[in-house]
Image: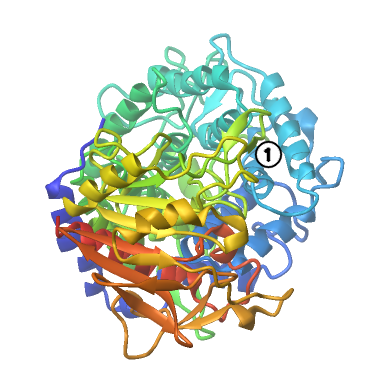
């Protein structure tokens, strides 16, 4: 259900690039990074929420860790991952038990930090089983969580029969990722059910806005005696809901029958958010439908959440591309109305309401006066986290026109190594899009997707049919018999099909490995067609942590591909020999490191190493003087730009 079109490209280029009109956007670091760094400066060792004197396992912690994860994947700076890991390690013990976590309270607010557990478990690192055990504990809570008669989660055990919008964000993104990772396909129906119940019972028929909560029993003093609904439309509650929708869709199977329904919910609420956006400021009010009423105010957390959901939803084609302009206007308003630059170089976010609840002690009646009585805080994490996420979406939107409508295919035929996944099933790994461990290309794929391209795998031999619609075709590290008992060597028919495809305008990427770990002889038969040969020489043999042995410098006078990245790390590579039409595009000490061949209407790029897999992009292993992440982004941009010449 896609809305992507040429109109989207025009919107992103003319409107979202227009964000630079705000003078603050000219800063060297993007807003997402500046806010993440500011947050870390306030919480150097642990995350303190509000006026708390000690750190606790809670949803604001989980929200911030997810925001930092987005910055980590966006920048490749390992310090953000290390912050997440160190924070979780303060709570998670080797047996999977969690400090300060109370299972018996059945509080959905305890679930969001589980998303960071899943992130850590999917990375290459020691003792990671403890993160799975802790995630299993949260999954067990959801399995036993009290429910309404129709199957909706109670928000907390002490709030019987009540579904709150907040709870959808607290539980469902974790639940969806866990279900996908550990193969619980049956649970996606239950996830969809939670949204169905909110749409059925909490959506206002007149405005399309969503009430903060409903009480199935209709016994609460705040509940309408006929509908069970709470009295008002609280901005942040709706913010939690729309964030939950766009995040759950990241994991919801593409072919699941309930997926279109979730997208329809987002399509239903998007025009409602646009309608209630304040026309002057671009942001949203605390009580959404009463902007002119005395005491109401423009509120930061709801505004950042709406911008995040609208920008992400439009980028991924769930809602029309025109909502990118709504998000852009909202983001401009956030910068103007809520962001404050501090004297120490950090930035702050103002005007986030501290809390908003119903019932409890003292009793919260859900009245207009109640929602306006809660304190307004500076740098409240419920605004800071979504601001980082919204910023990243706006930053992506400003650059993703280059890949719009283009498809990048990665070979899984010549490279077909397998392993057992987290669910015990066989899966492809080692230079694959899905592999998030150090051996995978997950980060490289994410770079392509954020540039607007679609990434796909090609598990079969190259044929005209299999390469149809592919703009960039990447073949990496063909298997030897050591790596696969039945390797698929490059054959004459494969070469003929690939040659025709390149000549017609395709962009081919050939990447080998050192000679001991790659089937080069057959691969070289393909490369020879384009004037390229991978030699038997090995260089940049790195000993231990002596990373400078893997250094490759980009000449200052040669910026054809790498505009800014100048210091690369490439370990144990095979240099290249070229004959016309191929030529070197990067030479080091008389060795050709990278070559390009213009062949017919197409382009071939070659490098004698897999190079930009996760281990050498994520900033966790090699020191941060190397610029592999930026180089990967610049190479991806260059490859996508070559496809425009087809």
Residue under the point 25% across and 50% down: 499
SS under mark 1: helix
Q: Is residue 467 above or below residue 61?
A: above
> As drawn, is 127 to the left or to the right of 565?
right
How has the structure been colored for display? rainbow
Image quadrant containing the N terminus:
top left
Please give the residue where the numbered disc 1 appears in the rendered image. 110
* Residues packed near mark 1 inside 10 Å, few (<14), some (14 to 19) or many (20 plus): many
> Is residue 414 among the parts visible in the rendering?
yes
Residue under the point 40% across and 19% down: 258
Residue under the point 33% across and 29% down: 263
> Is residue 296 among the parts visible in the rendering?
no
Q: Is residue 227 above or below residue 295?
A: above
Pick the front one: 207 or 44: 44
Which residue lies most toward the top here?
Answer: 149
Which residue lies most toward the bottom here?
Answer: 557
Residue under the point 49% across and 59% down: 512
Pick the front one: 17 or 388: 17
Pick the front one: 429 or 323: 429
Q: Give x and y (percent) for residue 462.
A: 34, 39
> As drawn, is 254 to the left or to the right of 323?
right
Pick the front one: 100 or 232: 100
Question: Which quadrant of the figure has residue 79?
Answer: bottom right
Q: Give x and y (percent) for residue 317.
A: 27, 40
């Amino acid at each position: 259900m896609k809305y992507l079109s040429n109109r989207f490209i025009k919107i992103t280029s003319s409107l979202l690039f227009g964000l630079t009109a705000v003078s603050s956007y000219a800063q060297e670091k993007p807003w997402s990074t500046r806010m993440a760094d500011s947050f870390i400066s306030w919480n150097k060792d642990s995350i303190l929420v509000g006026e708390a004197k000690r750190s606790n396992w809670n949803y604001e912690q989980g929200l911030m860790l997810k925001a930092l994860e987005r910055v980590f994947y966006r920048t490749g700076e390992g310090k953000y991952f290390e912050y997440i890991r160190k924070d979780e390690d303060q709570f998670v013990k080797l047996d999977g038990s969690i400090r300060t976590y109370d299972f018996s309270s059945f509080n959905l607010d305890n679930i969001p930090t589980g998303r960071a557990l899943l992130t850590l478990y999917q990375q290459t690192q020691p003792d990671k089983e403890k993160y799975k055990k802790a995630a299993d504990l949260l999954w067990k809570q959801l399995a036993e969580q009290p429910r309404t008669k129709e199957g909706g989660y109670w928000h907390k055990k002490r709030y019987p029969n009540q579904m709150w919008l907040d709870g959808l964000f607290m539980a469902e993104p974790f639940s969806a990722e866990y279900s996908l990772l550990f193969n619980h396909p049956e649970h996606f129906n239950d996830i969809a059910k939670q949204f169905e119940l909110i749409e059925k019972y909490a959506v206002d028929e007149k405005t399309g806005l969503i009430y903060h909560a409903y009480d199935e029993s209709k016994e609460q003093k705040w509940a309408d005696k006929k509908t069970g609904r709470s009295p008002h439309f609280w901005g942040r509650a709706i913010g939690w809901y729309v964030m939950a929708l766009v995040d759950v869709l990241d994991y919801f199977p593409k072919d699941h029958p309930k997926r279109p329904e979730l997208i329809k919910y987002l399509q239903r609420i998007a025009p409602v958010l646009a309608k209630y956006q304040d026309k002057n400021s671009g942001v949203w009010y605390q009580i959404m439908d009463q902007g002119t009423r005395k005491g109401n105010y423009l509120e930061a957390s709801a505004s950042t959440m709406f911008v995040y959901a609208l920008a992400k939803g439009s980028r991924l084609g769930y809602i029309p591309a025109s909502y990118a302009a709504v998000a852009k206007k909202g983001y401009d308003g956030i910068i103007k109305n809520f962001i404050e630059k501090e004297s120490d170089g950090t930035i702050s976010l103002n005007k986030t309401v501290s809390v908003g609840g119903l019932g409890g002690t003292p009793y919260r009646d859900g009245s207009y006066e109640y929602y306006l009585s809660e304190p307004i805080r500076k740098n409240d994490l419920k605004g800071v986290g979504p601001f980082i996420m919204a910023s990243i979406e706006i930053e992506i939107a400003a650059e993703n026109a280059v890949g719009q409508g283009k498809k990048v295919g990665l070979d899984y035929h010549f490279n077909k190594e397998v392993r057992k996944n987290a669910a015990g099933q066989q899966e492809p790994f080692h230079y694959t899009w899905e592999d998030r461990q150090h051996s995978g290309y997950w980060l490289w794929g994410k770079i392509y997707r954020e540039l607007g391209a679609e990434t796909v795998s090609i598990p079969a031999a190259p044929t005209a049919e299999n390469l149809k619609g592919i703009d960039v075709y990447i073949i990496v590290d063909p298997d030897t018999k050591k790596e696969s008992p039945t390797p698929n060597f490059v054959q004459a028919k494969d070469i003929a099909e690939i040659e025709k495809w390149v000549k017609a305008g395709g962009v081919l990427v050939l990447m080998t490995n050192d000679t001991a770990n790659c089937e080069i002889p057959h691969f070289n038969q393909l490369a020879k067609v384009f004037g390229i040969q991978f030699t038997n020489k090995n260089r940049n043999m790195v000993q231990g942590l002596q990373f400078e042995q893997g250094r490759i410098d980009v000449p200052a006078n040669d910026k054809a591909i790498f505009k800014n990245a100048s210091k690369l790390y490439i370990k144990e590579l095979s240099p290249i020999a070229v004959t016309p039409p191929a030529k070197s595009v990067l030479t080091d000490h008389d060795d050709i490191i990278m070559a390009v061949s213009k062949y017919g209407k197409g382009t071939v790029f070659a490098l004698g190493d897999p190079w930009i897999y996760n281990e050498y992009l994520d900033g966790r292993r090699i020191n941060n003087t190397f610029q592999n992440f930026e180089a990967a982004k610049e190479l991806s941009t260059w490859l996508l730009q070559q496809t425009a010449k087809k």
